[in-house]
Amino acid sequence: MTIQPSQNLISGKLSNGNIFQIFSREFAKHAYTMYLFTKSDLRTTLIPITCFAMAAAPELQPGNVLHSICWIWIHLLQFDVSNQTLSPEEDKENKSYRPLPAGRMTIRNALIFRWALVPICLLYSLCYSVETFYASIALCALTFIYDEMGMHSSHWIVRNVVNASGFASFEVGATLVATRDRTSLDDVAILAICCSAGIFATTIHTQDFKDVIGDAAVGRRTLPITQPNFARLTVPVVLTLWSIGLGYTWDLGWYTALAFVTLACVTSARFFFLRTIPQDKNSFYYWYNIWLSAAHALPGYYRYYNT
């Protein structure tokens, strides 16, 4: 019996090329899906915390900045996949481009991916140091508390505290990865993390103004829903007080302090007077996050001018 050579074997180069093209397309598809999970938080989490880590790191190593960004992003992905599996119907109203409402991933596969990311984050962190591993444990635990234990739908005070604790865990891990010695932080870094946690605890509700429609649809009790006028009033008060306090804490010069307080006043005025959903989105995504990134950069200003 004569064995005919397979057409695929004869055209091996073409088959290998096809396999590479298929692999490339699938990789690009899944990479884009992961990007969409984190898209809305790149400006609100990745950029501000990267600025923070670069400013707060005791001995910043430029080569470690990319490592820090990757550490933040993989943990952000872990949080976002967890959060977005809770109520995909909410995202149909607020963020229809996300993978679940867009149909790029099923809820079953998203849940598998969510829990697979936990050991990935922990092992990835352990590659840097035990201390970074502890920050990752805290962040994964707070994600579970916030999402699966329902703290995202609890009273706004509890929600703000858990949110602030999560951001503090982000900052500890990112700052450890960015510095030369990944096993400890100095007093300036610790003070910066404490200040940042306080900022998040008292201003994190600024992100909820733009989401009131979706939040109300799923029964979430955010401050802009339960006390809308009070919520608007707190923004100028809290941002101004924080700006003055941070100027004193980080020993800003008069002109720098004035510019920082002016930025806070402009941001506050937008939240107080411009109240449509598109306006709230611009106020939060751009103005608030510019102010927050500036606040996170202040420890670096202090290190440069006072050490």
Image (tube, helix red, strand yellow):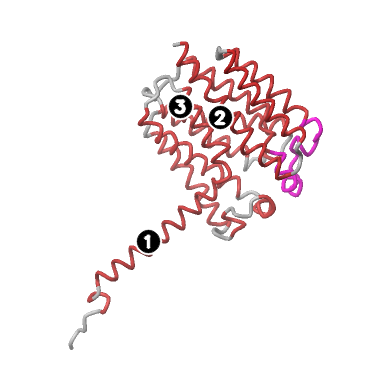
Q: Which residue is mark 1?
A: 23
In this view, which residue lies farthest toward the bottom?
1
Closer mark to the observer between disc 1 and disc 2: 2
Answer few, some or many: residues within 10 Å of disc 2's Cα (few below 14, many 20 plus, some between 14 and 19). many
Residue 247: x percent and y percent? 60, 16
Q: What secondary structure is found at the residue carrying circle 1?
A: helix
In the picture shown, does residue 1 fall above or below 20? below
Magenta stretch: give its range: 208-232
Q: Residue at x 58, y 60 (%)?
A: 103
In the picture shown, does residue 41 fall above or below 200? below
Whole-number angstrom distance, CA of label 1 to CA of label 2: 38 Å
Mark 2 or mark 3, earlier in chain: 3
**Closer to the camera in the image, 13 or 273:** 273
Answer few, some or many: residues within 10 Å of disc 3's Cα (few below 14, many 20 plus, some between 14 and 19). many
- Tell me which corner region of the image, top left, top right, bottom left or bottom right, holds residue 253: top right
In this view, which residue lies farthest toward the front?
255
Mark 1 or mark 2, earlier in chain: 1
Q: What secondary structure is found at the residue carrying circle 3?
A: helix
Whole-number angstrom distance, CA of label 2 to CA of label 3: 11 Å
Q: Residue at x 43, y 39 (%)?
A: 70
Q: Which residue is mark 3?
A: 54
Magenta highlight on residue 21: no
Mark 3 or mark 1, earlier in chain: 1
Q: Amino acid at mark 1?
A: Phe
Q: Which residue is mark 2?
A: 293
Q: What secondary structure is found at the residue carrying circle 2?
A: helix
Magenta highlight on residue 221: yes
Answer few, some or many: residues within 10 Å of disc 1's Cα (few below 14, many 20 plus, some between 14 and 19). few
